[in-house]
Image (cartoon, rainbow, N blue to C red):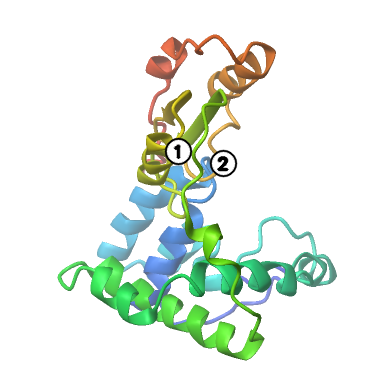
Amino acid sequence: IDDPFSGEPLEITVDDTVLANGIFATLYDTFAARAVPLAIHRAGEGELAAAADLLSLAGGFHKPRAQDEDEYFSLIDAEGAHWSPECAEEVAGSSLDEAVDAAQADNPIDQALLGDVEYVFSACRVWAVEAAPAATQDPIRSDVRTLIVAGQFDPITPPGWGERAADDLTSAQLVIVPFAGHGSTYERCPESLMMAFLDNPDQGVDTACLGELEARFRLP
C-alpha cells in the first residue's frame, strides 16, 4: 500500500491479526465501516493490498485524521491521557486470564484480537498507575432522564453495554442506531434524536426516522 505521508510504497504483511485489527479500527467510523464487507471479500480473494487499502487503519498505517506526519504525532501526544484511566479503571478491574476465558476459542476474530489485549496489560504494567477506587466498577444507578445512544456495529462500546447501563438507569431510553459504528450520531436522524432529547428530556424521543436508515455498503 502507499504510505499515507510520503506516498511511497509500503510493504506490510496482512495476517489474521492485522486484518482483524483493521476491521476493528474501521468500525469506529460509521462511514468507513461501509467498506468492511468489501475488504473481507477482497481478502478472501487474495487481494490483500486492496483489503488493507479499504480498511481505514490497515494495521496502523493509515491515519485519516492527519494531513502529515507532524500532525499525526501531535494527535498521539496524549498517550498518558489514554493509559492513565485505561490502566487505573478497566485493566485494574479485570485480568488477562478473564479476557482469555471470555474469548471464544472457535472465533478467529476473538483470537486475533487477544494479542492487543495482552499488549494493553503489558503497557499498564509499565505505566504503573494506582488502581482507581473500587466504586468505579459499580454501575451507575439513577432515575435522572437519560438518553443512551449506541451504534449497531460499534466495536468498543457495543449496544450490549448500553443495555447493561440502562438496567440501572430507571428513566433511560436506549436507542440503537442501525448500521452505525462508534460515531453513531453523525447522521441527521440520530443527531436530531439527541437534540430533541436535550430540548425536552422529559419526553421520550420519536425514533421513527431510524427505520429509514439504510445500509449503504461499498460494492465491488
- Which residue occupies 62% across, 90% down? 126
Give the residue type that dot 1 points to. Answer: Gly
Between the residue at mark 2 and the residue at mark 1, the CA separation in whole angstroms equals 7 Å
* Among the 4 quarters of the image, the one containing residue 39: bottom left
Query: Which residue is label 2 attached to?
Result: 183
Q: Which mark is residue 124?
A: none
Disc 1 residue crowd, few under 14, some 14–19, many 20+, Cα 10 Å = many
Compared across the picture, whether 185 is left or right of 115 comes to right
* Quadrant (top left/top right/bottom left/bottom right) for the C terminus: top left
Compared across the picture, whether 123 is left or right of 158 comes to right
- The residue nearer to you, when weighing 96 against 46, is 96
Compared across the picture, whether 13 is left or right of 106 comes to right
> Where in the figure is residue 42, as x and y percent of width and height?
33, 59
> Where in the figure is residue 149, as x and y percent of width and height?
50, 32
Disc 2 residue crowd, few under 14, some 14–19, many 20+, Cα 10 Å = some
Residue 7 can be seen, yes or no: yes
- The residue nearer to you, when weighing 173 against 16, is 173
Q: Which mark is residue 151?
A: 1
Residue 45 can be seen, yes or no: no
